[in-house]
Structure formats: structure tokens, C-alpha cells
Amino acid sequence: MTLIAPRVTAALPAEDAQKLGYALHGSDDITVFVDGTVHRLPAQARDAVVDLLARFSRGEAVTVSSVEEMLTTSRAAELAGISHTYLRNMTDRGEIPVEYRGTHRRIRLADIMAWLEKQKKNSTAEAAPDHADDGAADGS
């Protein structure tokens, strides 16, 4: 999945926000029309759309972004099998790319997987010469 840059949308004008608020009051049924065809949204999508519309109805600005492949530093450290502090230090040194959402660091799953693959290759490369030396020591 390719992540798309976050989209920021300004708050609705007060009159539009008020109309939307009235339309949403007491309802969480959202029907979407795409090219004139009616589509009922699955529960998760419906909840997200209702939340988005409710925020607009309160006059809030909204940012929409992809988060599925973005991990907290705690989750990324857990996946990598390293401490949270060690991972934060690596992001500070630029060894693993990091993005900020406000003051919170987020790390792409792909970047953690690439780092793990690099570690695996490095450990395999380091082990290979050791095996060759072992054979020479045996007189083989």
C-alpha cells in the first residue's frame, strides 16, 4: 500500500457546519453515492465517515492520512526485538527514518522490515568468513 500525504481540510463555514450537525443528529446511517450508484458503507468505514462529518459539524479543521503502515516507536521496537530507547536513538542518528505526527514519532513498517533485513544480511556476512576460517584451521 502506498501512503498518500495527509490532506488537511479547513473548517466548514459556521452555517454549513450547523446544517451538517442537524443532518447528523441522532443518525449514524451513511449512504454513499458513487457515479449514481448507492453503496452502503461497512461498519468501520461508516464510523470513520460519521466521525469525520461530526468534526466538520463542530467547525473543526480535519486532517486525513494513512496510518496502517505507520508504527509507534514502541510497536516498531517490539517488532524489531530491540528496546524502545535504542530505537529512538537510532532515529535520532538517522539510521532509521522517522516521521513526526505532532510531537509523536512514527516509523514506517517497511523501514523497520528493511532494517531487520539489513541486520540479517550483516550477521550472515559476518558468519560466513568465520566458517571459512574454521575449515582452514582443521587442515581441510
Image: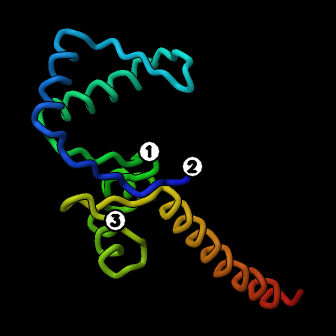
Q: CA distance from mark 1 to mark 2?
A: 9 Å
Secondary structure state at the residue bearing disc 3 = strand
Amino acid at dot 2: Met
- Crowd class of label 2 (few under 14; some 14 to 19; many from 20; radius 10 Å): few
Which numbered dot is residue 99?
Answer: 3
Tell me the distance, in whole angstroms, between the alpha carbons under discs 3 and 2: 17 Å
Q: Residues within 10 Å of mark 1 (few under 14, many from 20)?
A: few
Residue at label 2? Answer: 1
Quadrant (top left/top right/bottom left/bottom right) for the C terminus: bottom right
Nearer the N terminus, badge 1 or badge 2? 2
Residue at 81% in and 84% down? 135
Q: Is residue 40 left or right of residue 14?
A: right
Q: Are marks 1 and 2 in contact (CB under 8 Å)?
A: yes
Query: Does residue 103 sit above or below 60 in this rendering?
Result: below
* Amino acid residing under circle 3: Glu
> Dot 1 corresponds to which residue?
68
User: In the rendered picture of this protein, how many numbered marks are placed on residues?
Assistant: 3
Q: Compare residues 62 and 83 and report the one nearer the observer.
A: 62
In the picture, measured across the screen, residue 48 lies left or right of residue 33, that is left
The residue lying at 38 percent from left, 52 percent from top is 71
- Determine the secondary structure under disc 2: loop
Q: Are marks 3 and 2 in contact (CB under 8 Å)?
A: no
Residue 47, position as x, y percentages in the image: 32, 23
Determine the image quadrant of residue 11: top left
Looking at numbered disc 1 in the image, what kind of residue is underneath it?
Answer: Glu
- Residue at left offset 39%, top offset 60%: 107
